[in-house]
Amino acid sequence: MTTMHEGSAREAHRGILQAGTAGPAFTLNTTPDQTVSLEDFRGQNVILAFYPADWSPVCGDQVVLYNELLREFRRLNGALLGISVDGVWCHSAFAAARHLHFPLLADFEPKGAVAKLYGAYRTKDGVAERALFVLDGEGVIRWSYLSPIGVNPGADGILEALETITKTPRAA
Amino acid sequence: MAQLQSRVARLVVPVSERDHTYGPADAPVTLVEYGDYQCPYCGQAYGILKTIQSRFGRRLRFAYRHFPLAEIHPLAVGAAEAAEAAAAQGRFWEMHDLLYENQPVLGESDLMRYAHQLELDVARFVNELARHTYEGRVREDFMSGVRSGVNGTPTFFINGIRHDGPWDVDTLTEALMVAAQLHA
């Protein structure tokens, strides 16, 4: 159930899904012949990093930064998934160029469908927002953050959210 | 316009004895840089900061912390450890300057050459680099940056608040002046 308060907060954040909501299920390709599903990660915390496009300078910094923090994420039982509307070939070239060690998912066909489910699609531009979601082991969103599209949101919020989950498992 | 979440990024680990600082501890403005010796933008910032430092003189304390993005800059961690190894011999800033002035050449033999140039105890320097004595220290800097909202290099903090936007001489000078006035 969404309370009034959560409802208005959601509106203020241009509609990205907020903490307390179950993360909508999805399956996306990460390479031409491999898919990743949200449910593969049950029991594990998941960081969904939606971003507008491979190769754009800010995303470059953002994914490069997260790539350096995989150890810390893992220590907090967190798996990182990057998601944009770019196709698998674009993702694989980008991942190779930046030496990325986490999957990039192609929200490519139908375009932006998963971003839309999370309220993180910019219809005007046809790309995903720069939005972060941290989900717990049961697939419930515990933290979400919408960054101005040109601003790299950093990783401090993600680490804090993962630590909160570790310290205070959600009340059943 | 839709409202976005915005947070003021603050330095979570204040500048202390543990930091490499230049300028008096009681200066009205403290500028912290998180930098990567192999990052071309940090190389650009290096020259800008020299100008800023000479402009402000003793009104500015500058602190440098490591933020090596190792996967895209494979020589950055080694260079940061070299700066720390020089620091252990009291020569951090000299090594820091050499690293930025010779940015394209940061291989192992180059680092050794710089150690010779600074007349360090080279055997100790080489040994500490080989054993990665300062790996933990460099990672500590990196994580303090992550916790403070560092999102790329270089990132600056002025009196503990992240400086967003351009960092050319004029913009940075103005931001530092404002901080100095607030401090006064």
Image: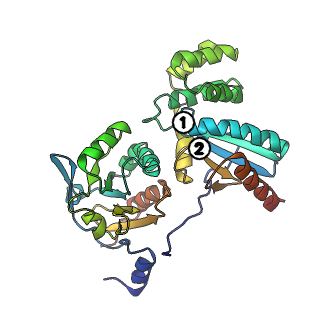
* The one of B70 and B19 positioned closer to us in this rendering: B70
At 40% from the left and 87% from the top, the residue drawn is A4
Q: Distance between the residues labelled 2 and 1?
A: 8 Å
Q: Look at the image and tell me whether residue B152 can be seen.
A: yes
Q: The C terminus of chain A lies in which quarter of the figure?
A: bottom left
Residue A16, position as x, y percentages in the image: 37, 71
At 84% from the left and 43% from the top, the residue drawn is B58
Q: Is residue A83 above or below residue A123?
A: above
Q: Relative to A21, is B90 on the left or the right?
A: right
Q: Is residue A86 above or below residue B140?
A: below
Residue B68, position as x, y percentages in the image: 52, 37
Residue B87, position as x, y percentages in the image: 67, 28
Say whether mark 1 and mark 2 are on the same chain.
yes
Q: Relative to A57, is A86 on the left or the right?
A: left
Element type where label 1 sits in the image: loop
Identify which amino acid the numbered label 2 is placed on: Pro
Q: Is residue B58 above or below residue A83?
A: above
* The one of B147 and A34 positioned closer to us in this rendering: A34
Residue B9, position as x, y percentages in the image: 59, 58
Q: Relative to A110, is B40 on the left or the right?
A: right
User: Picture quarter containing residue A111?
Assistant: bottom left
* The one of B162 and B11 positioned closer to us in this rendering: B162
Label 2 sits on residue: B154
Element type where label 2 sits in the image: loop
Question: Who comes first in sequence, dot 2 or dot 1?
Answer: 1
At 79% from the left and 62% from the top, the residue drawn is B182
* The one of A169 and A79 positioned closer to us in this rendering: A79
Q: Which chain carries label 2?
A: B
Q: Do the residues labelled 2 and 1 touch (CB within 8 Å)?
A: yes
Identify which amino acid the numbered label 1 is placed on: Cys
Q: Which chain carries label 1?
A: B
Label 1 sits on residue: B39
